Amino acid sequence: MPLHNHLHVHPGPDPTHWRKSTVSNPSGNCVELAELSGGMVAVRNSRQPTGPVLIYTRAEIAAFIHGVRRGEFDDLAG
């Protein structure tokens, strides 16, 4: 599956402040997000903090969050 221009894997240094939901489960099954310089947003697996990082624009993150709020991904939650 080809990578789209807006999706980048970034193994570089950690941003200053990673955030995850306060309702994350104790087994660590969650993602963390961090604001990067230039208005980009980094996303990573909290169980693999030194693993790959996906980089998105604010518009892409906003579209995803909007879809989550509308319930568009509820069927993926299990």
Image: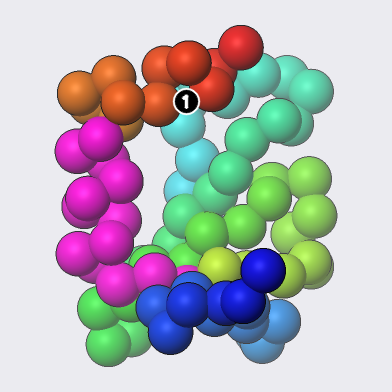
Q: Is 16 in front, or is 68?
A: 68
* Nearer to me, 3 or 63: 3
**Quadrant in the picture for residue 56:** bottom left
Amino acid type, label 1: Thr
Residue in the picture at 74% in, 59% down: 49
> Closest to the observer: 15 or 12?
12
Q: Main secondary structure of the magenta part?
A: helix
Which segment is the magenta one? 55-67
- Which corner quadrant holds the N terminus? bottom right
8 lies left or right of 30: left
Local crowd size for mark 1, using a 10 Å CA cut-off: few (<14), some (14–19), many (≥20): few
Residue 6's x, y, as percent? 40, 78
Where is the C terminus found, in terms of image quarters? top right
In this view, 75 is above or below 13: above
The residue to which callout 1 is attached is 22
Q: Which residue is at a point 50% across and 40% down the rendered structure image?
A: 20
| Secondary structure type for disc 1 | loop
Instruction: Give x and y (percent) for residue 21.
Output: 46, 32
Residue extending farthest to the front is: 1
Residue 71 in magenta stretch: no
Image quadrant assignment for residue 36: bottom left
Residue at the image position 30 percent from the left and 56 percent from the top: 61
